[in-house]
Amino acid sequence: MVSQAKKSVALPAVIDLDSLDDIRDGLIDAIEEGPVTVTAAAVERVSTNALFMLISAAEAARRNHFDFAIEQPSAALVTAIERLGLGAQFSGMMRG
């Protein structure tokens, strides 16, 4: 069995409607190739749509039988997840 190299996607400080397309495209490319690590330490502001996009990306990775993890989630990201009641959806993918 060939080991898949883990792809890394770093999230910007502001994840809003203007940045969603670029992030989505990067996630789609990464998910098609193998396991994905999303680095979220720099996130200062995140839109609700961005959180749903991350949930969708994690589901797509699962369907492709690849790991999907969010590493070093910032306090702003964690707060947004909690405020929207999405903790259960993110619990399995958060690292650190």
Image: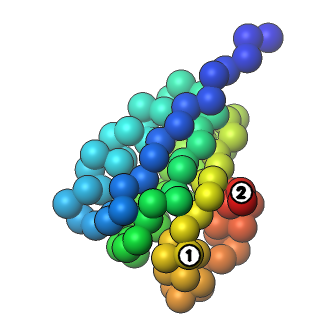
Q: Residues within 10 Å of mark 2 (few under 14, many from 20)?
A: few
What residue is drawn where x is 42% and y is 53%? 11
Left or right of 47 on screen, residue 21: left
37 to 80, vertically: above or below: above
Q: Secondary structure at mark 1?
A: helix
Residue type, label 1: Ala
Identify residue for label 1: 75
Q: Nearer the viewer, residue 35 or 62?
A: 35
Instruction: Residue 83: give x, y in percent of width and height.
Output: 53, 88
Left or right of 4 on screen, residue 57: left
Q: Residues within 10 Å of mark 1 (few under 14, many from 20)?
A: some
Image quarter of the N terminus: top right
35 to 55, vertically: above or below: above
Residue type, label 2: Arg
Q: Residue furthest front?
A: 42
First in sequence: mark 1 or mark 2? 1
Using the numbered discs, state the Cα–Cα distance from disc 1 to disc 2 in whole angstroms: 13 Å
Q: Nearer the viewer, residue 20 or 12?
A: 12
